[in-house]
Image: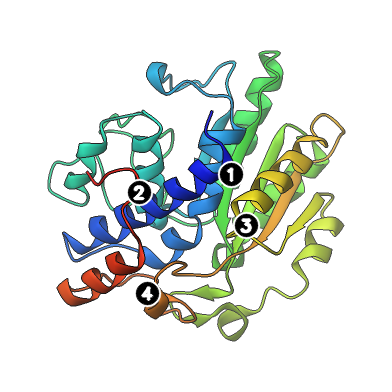
Amino acid sequence: MLNNNDLEKLCTQVRRDIVRMVHAPASGHPGGSLGCVEFLVALYFKVMKHNPSSFKMDGLNEDIFFLSNGHISPVFYSVLARSGYFPVAELNTFRKLNSRLQGHPTTHEGLPGVRIASGSLGQGLSVAIGAALSKKLNNDSSIVYTLHGDGELQEGQIWEAAMYAAAHKVDNLIASVDYNGRQIDGDVDAVLSLGNLKAKFESFGFVVIENNKGNDINAVIEKLAEAKTFIGKGKPIIILMKTEMGMGVDYMMGTHKWHGSAPNDEQLKKALDQLPETIGDY
């Protein structure tokens, strides 16, 4: 298992993967992908019990993860490849015709590590609840994890699912929210404010854990470990994780403009100059 220094180096390499993947087809979503690197790296390399070499769609007897905000597929694909689900070289095919690495994750290509098609926002929590209940029926003590965008919480299905999870005591589920405050049309507060998100989820019956350092690998690991202490105690769990959209690339930070825009050749070079190669490019 990698130590935290190795995990930080991996985070830098994943960020290189992201900007290169999005640059090649001149299409994709680098902003949120860069902001969620620490979360996905911590989850797949430190926290989850999973077997990349023997992927099964049912996920029986292993922890499973659902990416609900599927537009941040670049970070998802990079972490899946780097953890051994498929060859790292396949990242070269991102968003190309007939690639298994579509702009939003899909299942009909049979890409190991992907269990649902995601991109239509608001659906991931519902799917995760179904998977968590299935694990209970199978006497499977492993955990279901999800990730959601904060703008995604403007979707009504999220709150229907939240009511259901609490009412049915889905306590083998840990959801996380990428709380970066930005979405494709601007700041979340300007588009449709979420109000007091902590109070809302608590009123819906969730255990709420706040992580104000979502781009600190140590803090991410610590908060995920804290969340696991509430497994089996009668309530679903959610982590509200403050991150920076575009983290690691100075001109992508502090704005929503890189939510769904690809860097040109000059911008790619500038980004890569800020992200030294640590493990090896694909």
Tag 1 and tag 4, C-beta contact below 8 Å = no
Q: Which mark's residue is nearer the viewer, 4 or 2?
A: 2
Which amino acid lies under the numbered mark 3 shown in the image of this protein? Val
Q: Is residue 210 left or right of residue 80?
A: right
- Residue type at the position of mark 2: Thr
Q: Which of marks 1 and 2 is in front?
A: 2
Q: Which residue is drawn at 39% across and 76% down?
A: 252
**Crowd band around label 2 with a 10 angstrom C-alpha radius: few (<14), some (14–19), many (20+):** some
Q: How far apart are marks 1 and 2 (CA)?
A: 28 Å
Q: Kindly identify the residue that appears in the image at 78 percent across and 42 percent down.
A: 226
Numbered circle sitting on residue 258? 4
Identify the residue position indicated by label 1 in the image: 146
Local secondary structure at mark 3: strand
Give the label on residue 177, or none. 3
Residue nearest the viewer, comparing 99 with 8? 8
Horizontal and vertical percent for residue 152? 55, 63
Q: What element carries label 1?
A: strand
**N-terminal label among 1 and 2:** 1
What kind of element bears circle 2? loop
- Residue 33 drawn above or below residue 207: below
Gap between marks 3 and 1 measured at Cα: 8 Å
User: If you read the primary sequence from the N terminus, does the residue marked by circle 4 or circle 2 appear first?
Assistant: 4
Answer whether labels 1 and 2 touch (C-beta < 8 Å). Answer: no
**Closer to us: 196 or 264:** 264
First in sequence: mark 1 vs mark 4: 1
Relative to 170, 56 lies left or right:
left
Q: Please give the label number shown on residue 278.
A: 2
